[in-house]
Image (cartoon, rainbow, N blue to C red):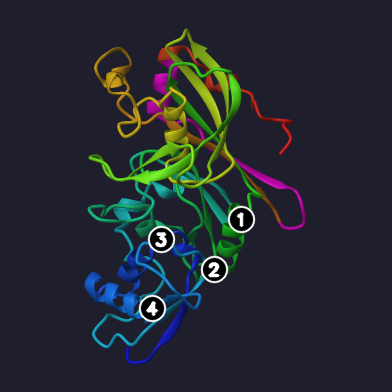
């Protein structure tokens, strides 16, 4: 590439750090050189100087200077996965129409690639093309160890509209979690800012009264096992990184199986038998064209169903504790 160009951020890249955006589209450009270009103002985001750690959003425009020795932009999405890696996807489809596909993401599968992450959903999306011209696009994300409903746009236009709906809070997401302890009161709202902090187990977020980004989570106890554990419904009002995990830990009821935000004693005995994260994206409600709402629900995964059974919780008996609440 020999000339300056301006590239628009796609829905696939929404939320990426700018340096990772360049790594995805221009893998021949080293980090040191990118930093020099940023310092000189040759790389800009929506016409303004920026930094490598800035998060890009769908629709933003990136000024890319001449990069003669860097690989030119690739088509959307990573190299496709092998067919044997994607055979499970057809059974994971919860809903499909002309604009979106909803799948039940299994726990343990990363949504996107990164350092040391070679198996991820983004590389598998060609298996969900179904003869369409465009491959499906991610419009939101779930943590690697969180299971449940994940929405994909079937075209760039659909993905942009869905991403906008998530950003403008026109969607409603409901999660189920099993936690250590029982929160008091049994129904309420967690309103704690979250600041990113480096740590021995990687980047994490921490509740802070003044630093970080505002974060709000509604919660309600669906059932409890004495004072030792509870089954919660969680409804995020905002969508911060690790928000539900950090908020539950901040009020003294960390999610079972959470090695990043949980208590050390959870893994020493008793509740320590819970080795996998007990957090599930149970349902999503989305606006549909012409009015109305689409609701997609994901069944509880086996590892969480087993844990619920150990506590005597019955997923089939659950009501939505937020139904009828004012939005």
Residue drawn at x 27%, y 77% is: 36
Query: How many angstroms separate mark 1 from mark 4 (CA)?
Result: 39 Å
Q: Which mark is residue 134?
A: none
Q: Earlier in the sequence, mark 1 or mark 4?
A: 4
Q: Nearer the viewer, mark 2 or mark 3?
A: 3
Gap in angstroms between the C-alphas marked 2 and 3: 17 Å
Task: Quickly name the residue at label 4.
Answer: 43
User: How crowded is the residue under tag 3: few (<14 C-alpha within 10 Å), some, or many (20+)?
Assistant: some
* Residue position marked by numbered label 1 in the rendering: 97
Tag 3's secondary structure? loop
Dot 4: what SS?
loop
* Of pointers 1 and 3, the one earlier in the residue sequence: 3
Q: Residue 204's x, y, as percent?
A: 34, 42
Along the viewing direction, whichever of 243 and 173 lies nearer the viewer? 243
Judged from the image, the secondary structure of the residue bearing numbered disc 1 is: loop
Relative horizontal placement of residue 327, taking residue 16 as reference (left or right):
right
Task: Answer with the quarter of the image where residue 7 lies.
Answer: bottom left
Q: CA distance from mark 1 to mark 2?
A: 15 Å
The residue wearing badge 3 is 16
Is tag 2's residue or tag 3's residue first in the polypeptide sequence?
Answer: 3
- Contact check, label 1 and label 2, Cβ < 8 Å: no
Magenta stretch containing residue 74, yes or no?
no
Which label's residue is closer to the chain start, 4 or 3?
Answer: 3
- Cα distance in 3D space between marks 2 and 4: 25 Å
Bounds of the magenta segment: 289-309
Is the residue 326 above or below the residue 105 in the image? above
Which residue is at 30% across, 85% downward? 67
């Amino acid at each position: 590439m020999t000339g300056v160009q301006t590239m628009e951020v796609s829905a696939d890249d929404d939320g990426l750090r700018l340096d990772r955006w360049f790594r995805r589209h221009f893998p021949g450009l080293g980090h040191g050189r990118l930093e020099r270009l940023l310092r000189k103002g040759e790389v800009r985001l929506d016409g303004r100087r920026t930094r490598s750690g800035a998060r890009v959003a769908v629709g933003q425009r990136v000024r890319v200077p001449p990069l003669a020795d860097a690989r030119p932009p690739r088509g959307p999405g990573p190299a496709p996965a092998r067919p044997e890696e994607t055979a499970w996807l057809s059974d994971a489809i919860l809903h499909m129409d002309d604009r979106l596909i909803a799948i039940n993401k299994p726990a343990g599968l990363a949504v996107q690639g990164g350092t040391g992450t070679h198996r991820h959903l983004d590389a598998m999306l060609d298996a969900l093309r179904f003869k369409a011209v465009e491959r499906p696009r991610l419009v939101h994300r779930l943590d690697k160890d969180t299971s449940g409903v994940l929405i994909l746009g079937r075209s760039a236009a659909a993905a942009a509209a869905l991403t906008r709906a998530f950003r403008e809070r026109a969607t409603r997401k409901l999660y189920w979690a099993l936690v250590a302890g029982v929160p008091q009161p049994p129904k309420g709202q967690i309103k704690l800012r979250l600041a990113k902090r480096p740590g021995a187990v990687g980047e994490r977020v921490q509740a802070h009264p003044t630093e970080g980004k505002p974060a709000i989570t509604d919660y309600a106890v669906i059932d409890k096992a004495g004072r030792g554990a509870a089954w919660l419904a969680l409804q995020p009002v905002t969508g911060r990184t690790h928000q539900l995990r950090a908020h539950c830990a901040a009020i003294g009821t960390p999610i079972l199986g959470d090695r990043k935000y949980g208590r050390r004693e959870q893994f020493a005995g008793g509740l320590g038998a819970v080795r996998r994260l007990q957090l599930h994206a149970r349902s999503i409600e989305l606006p549909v064209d012409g009015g109305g709402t689409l609701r997609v629900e994901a069944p509880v995964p086996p590892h969480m169903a087993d844990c619920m059974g150990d506590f005597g919780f019955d997923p089939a008996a659950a009501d939505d504790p937020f139904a009828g609440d004012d939005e």
